[in-house]
Image (cartoon, rainbow, N blue to C red):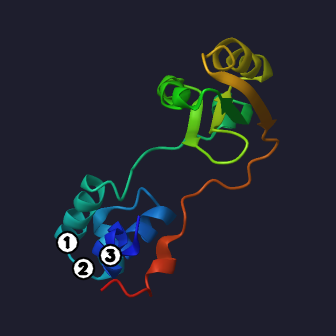
């Protein structure tokens, strides 16, 4: 997407401040945001609704997998042949409840996914009995996460000072 067509051109400093504040504390109330940013609660509500409606802001709860018994967190790379099977494979993987992240990639592998499983047996069954048997999956490579130190969205404050006119 060219810079001229970027959704960032439609956002102003207040939008970025709202996004940044919610990135720090996604449960912050409209009243607290309004007080911090020195605008009305109605302004925050309207901006928030617009950000959500335009798919700029997605709000969801993120579970700490270890606290709910999902101790096998893994990164799986998938090679697909023929390449026209990629979309069908993505559509299937999207519905797997273990999938936390799913993307198309360049390089040696076509699909990247992160999964959260109860244990190594669950992970093994997922890979061998469900992923590797999908038509078009020719190779997988799995890396286990031993310790996750950070999960976060990018810090959008870097855009505050850019000229959006």
Residue 102 at what x, y percent from top left? 56, 38
* Residue 54 vs residue 151, the one in the foreground: 54
Cα distance between the residues tagged 3 and 2? 22 Å
Residue at (65%, 32%) from the top-left corner?
115
Relative to 42, 95 lies left or right: right
Does dot 2 land on a helix, a strand or a loop?
loop
Q: Quadrant of the N terminus?
A: bottom left
**The quarter of the displayed image where residue 153 is located:** bottom right
Disc 3 crowd rating (10 Å Cα; few below 14, some 14-19, many 20+) is: few
> Residue 21 shows which numbered tag?
none
In terms of sequence position, does the residue under pointer 3 or pointer 2 come before the other? Answer: 3
Disc 2 crowd rating (10 Å Cα; few below 14, some 14-19, many 20+) is: few
Label 3–label 2 contact, CB within 8 A: no
User: What residue does disc 3 label?
Assistant: 9
Residue 55 at what x, y percent from top left? 32, 54
In terms of sequence position, does the residue under pointer 3 or pointer 1 come before the other? Answer: 3
Front of the two marks 3 and 1: 3
Label 2–label 1 contact, CB within 8 A: yes
Cα distance between the residues tagged 2 and 1? 7 Å
User: What residue does disc 1 label?
Assistant: 43
Label 3–label 1 contact, CB within 8 A: no
């Amino acid at each position: 997407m060219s810079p001229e067509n970027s959704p960032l051109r439609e956002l102003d400093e207040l939008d970025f401040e709202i996004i940044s504040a919610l990135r720090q504390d996604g449960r912050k109330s409209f009243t607290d945001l309004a007080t911090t940013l020195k605008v009305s609660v109605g302004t925050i509500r309207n901006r928030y609704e617009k950000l959500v409606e335009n798919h700029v802001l997605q709000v969801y709860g993120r579970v700490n997998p270890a606290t709910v018994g999902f101790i096998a967190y893994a990164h799986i790379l998938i090679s697909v042949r023929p390449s026209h099977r990629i979309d069908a494979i993505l559509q299937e993987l999207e519905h797997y409840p273990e999938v936390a992240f799913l993307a198309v990639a360049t390089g040696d592998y076509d699909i990247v996914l992160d999964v959260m499983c109860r244990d190594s047996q669950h992970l093994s069954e997922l890979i061998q009995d469900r992923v590797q048997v999908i038509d078009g999956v020719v190779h997988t490579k799995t890396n286990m996460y031993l310790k996750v130190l950070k999960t976060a969205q990018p810090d959008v404050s870097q855009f505050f000072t850019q000229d959006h006119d």
